Image (spheres, grey):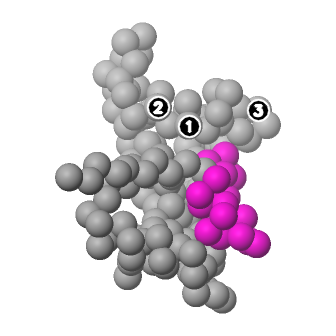
Amino acid sequence: MRSDAFVLGAGFSIAVADPAPFPTAAQLGLDAIAMLRAIHRSPARDHSSVCDGLSCDDPQLDATGRWPTRTFEQWLSLLAEPQPWLHPQDNDRNRALFAELLSTLSACLRSSTDEALRFKAPPDWLVGLVRRWLADGTDVVTFNYDTLVEATID
């Protein structure tokens, strides 16, 4: 019985998307925030004087317009899970912002994947590898956020 398994990391996505590098999680975060700011600041809505482009009266971003933690992924984790030091209504606001970011990130990921595959077919080595995985019933574990392998299967 065969028990091969492949674990994929960021280098895999970079190799597939080469020469157009796939965006990092931090870049995707910036792209998502930019998209939400554009929607949030639409002229059809009044804004308070305290508005960071995501939330009025309760800014989520720091003074430079970036997330308030060391990394975008840390900020997502803080928003996704109830924090014991926050009131329930504050955790609810965080969860709502997380849901908005998640939806926007999904759109950014789809766009990045489409862009990575738009002008070229998947590399021959990837097509061969995916065919082999499918034929052998290989387990594939990925820590990547893109769907480049799935797009190759499609």
Tell me which residue sits at (60%, 60%) in the image: 13
Q: Which mark is residue 73?
A: 1
In the rendered image, residue 135, in percent from the top left (x then y), is placed at: 29, 73
Q: CA distance from mark 3 to mark 2?
A: 21 Å
Mark nearest the camera among 1 and 3 is 1
Mark nearest the camera among 3 and 2 is 2
- Pointer 3: what residue? 63
Q: Nearer the viewer, residue 154 or 87?
A: 154
Q: Which mark is residue 23?
A: none
Q: Are marks 2 and 1 in contact (CB under 8 Å)?
A: yes
Q: Is residue 57 visible?
A: no
Mark 1 or mark 3: name the one nearer the start of the chain. Answer: 3
Tell me which residue sits at (50%, 61%) in the image: 146
Identify the element where label 3 is drawn: loop
Q: Amino acid at mark 3?
A: Ala
Quadrant where the C terminus sits is bottom left
- Which image quarter: residue 140? bottom left
Q: Nearer the viewer, residue 132 or 25?
A: 132
- Pointer 2: what residue? 77
Magenta highlight on residue 25: yes
- Magenta-highlighted residues: 11-27
Identify the element where label 1 is drawn: helix
Q: Nearer the viewer, residue 142 or 65?
A: 142
Q: CA distance from mark 1 to mark 3?
A: 19 Å
- Which image quarter: residue 138? bottom left
In the rendered image, residue 8, in percent from the top left (x then y), is placed at: 50, 51
Q: Residue 12, relative to residue 117: is it above or below?
A: above
Q: CA distance from mark 2 to mark 1?
A: 6 Å
